[in-house]
Image (cartoon, grey):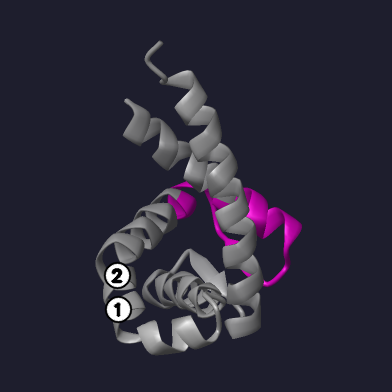
């Protein structure tokens, strides 16, 4: 139940990022659902590999290169999908930052909602 709710809220977060920021475009809620799934899939499969491969750069930049990796995942998802479009790398960086902040809020809210006391 928590996973489905997180997926729906992540799609809503993606729609709100597209509403707030012009560099990210989402056609409709169905496209947002698919995009949220693909972004999550890329973050689970590709992101760990990229983090390990770019570890020296990440250490030199004190972890700031992780923002670039997040933006690449965001941008790659827009390249694969038709209803989700990011205008460029700068837009992907800003969009992924906004999406990450909303993801933290969603995780916090769901953690409080589904906590076992």
Q: Give the image location of residue 58, x and y in percent.
A: 46, 82
Instruction: State the mark number for residue 75.
Output: none
* Left or right placement of residue 111 versus residue 50 in this view: right
Q: Which residue is located at x 26 percent, y 76 percent?
A: 49
Placement of 114 over or under 19, stated as above or below: above
Residue at position x 49%, y 38% in the image = 107
In this picture, is 88 found above or below 24?
A: below
Locate residue 111, reporting x and y percent.
Answer: 46, 29
- In this rendering, is residue 52 above or below 94? below
Dividing the image into 4 quarters, which one contains the N terminus?
top left
Q: Position of residue 93 (x, y in %)?
A: 61, 74
Quarter location, residue 98: bottom right
Question: In the rendered image, which quarter is residue 115 located in?
Answer: top left
- Write the residue at 45% across / 55% down: 31
Does residue 88 appear in this view? no
**Marks 2 and 1 in Cβ contact (< 8 Å):** yes
- Find out whether residue 110 is within the magenta segment: no
Q: Name the residue that disc number 1 marks.
A: 52
Which residue sits at x=30%, y=78%? 52
**Residue that mark 2 sits on:** 48
Tell me the crowding category of disc 1: few under 14, some 14 to 19, or many 20 or more residues within 10 angstroms, Cα based: few
Q: Mark 1: which secondary structure?
A: helix
- Given residues 105 and 116, the one toward you in this image is 116
Q: Quadrant of residue 82?
A: bottom left
Viewer-proximal residue among 65 and 76: 65
Mark 2 surroundings: few (<14), some (14-19) or many (≥20) residues within 10 A: few
Q: Which residues are magenta?
A: 14-32
| Residue farthest along the top direction in this orientation | 117
């Amino acid at each position: 139940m928590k996973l489905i709710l997180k997926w729906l809220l992540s799609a809503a977060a993606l729609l709100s990022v597209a509403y707030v920021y012009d560099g990210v475009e989402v056609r409709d809620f169905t496209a947002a659902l698919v995009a949220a799934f693909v972004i999550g899939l890329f973050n689970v499969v590709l992101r760990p590999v990229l983090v390990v491969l770019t570890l020296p750069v990440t250490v030199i930049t004190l972890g700031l290169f992780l923002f670039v990796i997040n933006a690449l995942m965001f941008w790659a998802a827009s390249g694969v999908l038709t209803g989700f479009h990011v205008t460029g790398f700068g837009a992907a960086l800003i969009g992924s930052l906004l999406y990450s902040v909303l993801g933290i809020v969603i995780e916090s809210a769901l953690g409080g909602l589904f906590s076992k006391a």
